[in-house]
Image (tube, grey):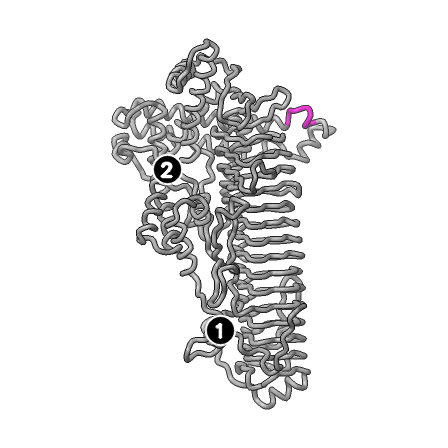
Amino acid sequence: MNKINKQPISSLGYNFIGAPHIPKGKDEYYLRNIQHRTDNTYRRLTAIEIKQLIANDNTCDDWKNIWVTDHFNAELVQRCKFFGLIRIGKLEPFFLEFHNLRAPVGLYNSIIISSDFGDNVAVDNVNYLSHYIIGNDVILGNINELSTTDHAKFGNGVIKKGESESVRIWLELCNENGGRSVLPFNGMKAGDAHLWTKYRADEVLMNKFREFTDQKYDTRRGYYGKIGDRTVIKNTRIIKDAWIGSDVYIKGANKLKNLTINSSPEAHTQIGEGCELVNGIIGYGCRIFYGVKAVRFILSDNSQLKYGARLINSYLSENSTISCCEVLNSLIFPAHEQHHNNSFLCASVVMGQSNMAAGATIGSNHNSRGPDGEIVAGRGFWPGLCVSLKHNSKFASFTIIAKGDFQSELHIPIPFSLVNNDVGNNKLVVMPGYWFMYNMYALARNAGKYSSRDKRIDKSIQYEYDFLAPDTVNELFDALVIMKKATGETFLAREGKKISEETALRHGSKLLEENAVPDNSEIWATGFENADRKVQLVKLPKAYRLFKELIAYYGMIRLVQLIRENGIDTFEQLKTVLKKPVRHPWMNIGGQLIRERSVKTLIRNIHTGKTSSWDEVHAFYKTCSEQYAAQKTEHAFASLLEIKNVSAEKFSKKLFHEWLREAVSTKEWMTRNIYESRAKDYSNAFRKMVYDSEKEMEKVIGKLKDNAFINQQQEELKLFKKQVLEIIKGFGL
């Protein structure tokens, strides 16, 4: 049976905060008065104004509790019912217009309970408006319920005084059984969530993170909901316990409950038809449209949910789009794309610049007795059409997966690989370096695309979008070791010899360095799949050479950039600036690359209390961003010396000149490969057969010679050559 309480009508609009929760000497409005930031001076209604209001079919439990400014116009308030303390700003005979919606200034046809209104608001047909502070020039029309409770948390994972721990909101990220849950809060970074979910065995750190969150928010009851200036809300059913920023546009939403919706004039947020959003934080400049369902979630700045997307117990980082599909229990770093109704992502950490194809089901099946499986994927993760992956699996950066049901858990440690399930031959086939060999156009174009789509207003935290960076280059070094070991094991096994890992590495290194392995050799590996079938590494010798060349290229382009940015005039000056480098381990912390030792220092500082709040953690991220360029250059130089097997002391003018020439050659190859990988689309007979003529094809897909990205790459090649030539001449090489 529903419990219906009956209270005197005279109490409607009062006692918002229960007596036990009102501090001594305060009233129920003490927090509201702090929140209501305005320069307006209020007065009580005059007898004439009360008479006008009654004549306009308005009612009030006590007219003395309506306060107005000197610019109040009673004629612009009609057919409203007022309860509790009401404050109304300036009302003038204008109408407000937004996207062809024209709404007269004033309050009309609404029940209004204990709320504050800014200047020149347009409120019409709000069936129930309770305990809100509304800004200037706001339009509210055709809303069933707009209310706030005394225990509103606005999507933050805190509890109010007198509440039990059971009502606290947790986000169950990365794992369906809740073993990596975090407390959401407004302003939470993907790095915060990543650290919180990753270091579960560190109980001190876990407790500190919880303390940081609790201390960030007031536990007092009685905060009102807020609606910022110039916000427009129309044709919406229920908005409850929502903190809404300025310049938000909400139209046709079904239910918005327990939310913070961030928005500003520079980055305004929109929520559209049929959306149901509960227990979440929404960032600046977000777009949420057409039947989206999101529960227990964080949507970071400049991201989108569209076309019936479902986002549950998940964190979606900046500059990302999810439409049509379902995402559960996942932590997703910046620049994620997922556009297809039949794709599914569950219990995963996806480290950014990722793309989920149609039919991809990531973590869709369980192979244990509980729903506790996980998938971890590095930057550039691209599961192709109709891919099904099983928990637990782990993928290096820029892994692309060919269509197929992968029945066993996978561990792909080599970056830039194509993974293929060869069912006919009962083997797993991995092609290292696939992107560089066959799709350089997409790889290079995506790096620029992600950068250009980064519309964050605050870019003090730098995200890495380049495919050659400290994280991926370290993976390339690890991959070289894996390739040597696999090659040595394969060739020694043919001789029937007993093989130690050290022997396999030494023999594989000798074969690959001497180019003694044909590119079409069958090389076998272990540890890539939890199955008895073979794992073949194809085109391994070519990938080995490519990886070495790309590491050297990464080092040289950073040196060229260093010389130009710092006005270095001589080789001796360059050596002084570079000093003795170290190739440190790096971590991807929410899309930001940070040295592993810096992360360990942060954790140690949190343990000792030196870092004692989320604001200080975020300051750490900003400091790391400021240091990133210099640290990346050090890493690049260290990588260059290591791959060339040269010490810093032996780094000479002659070697530098030689490596500059090699870098130009690599840049020429990459630019040529970018062109050729796109040119295939213009020459392939199966691509061309849908067009009756070349002219028709060019009208549809454009002329190859007009391709803006290819032309840009060719211009960059010319510029790089020019810069290298200037360095050679200037250094006297």
Residue 303 vertical position relative to residue 248 in the rendered view, above or below: above
222 or 726, which lies in front? 222
Q: How far from the left and from the top, in percent, is residue 346?
A: 57, 42
Kindly identify which residue carries mark 2.
Answer: 632
Residue 175 vertical position relative to residue 427 in the rendered view, above or below: below
Residue 635 vertical position relative to residue 626 in the rendered view, above or below: above
Does residue 320 show up magenta in the picture?
A: no
Q: Determine if residue 545 is in view.
A: no
Disc 2 marks a residue whose amino acid type is: Lys
Disc 1 marks a residue whose amino acid type is: Arg
Q: Determine if residue 306 is in view.
A: yes
SS type, badge 2: helix
Picture quadrant of residue 644: top left
Of mark 1 and mark 2, the one earlier in the sequence is 1
Kindly identify which residue carries mark 1.
Answer: 32
Q: Nearer the viewer, mark 1 or mark 2?
A: 1
Q: How far from the left and from the top, in percent, is residue 614?
A: 40, 55
Q: Residues within 10 Å of mark 2 (few under 14, many from 20)?
A: many
Q: How far from the left and from the top, in percent, is residue 554?
A: 40, 31
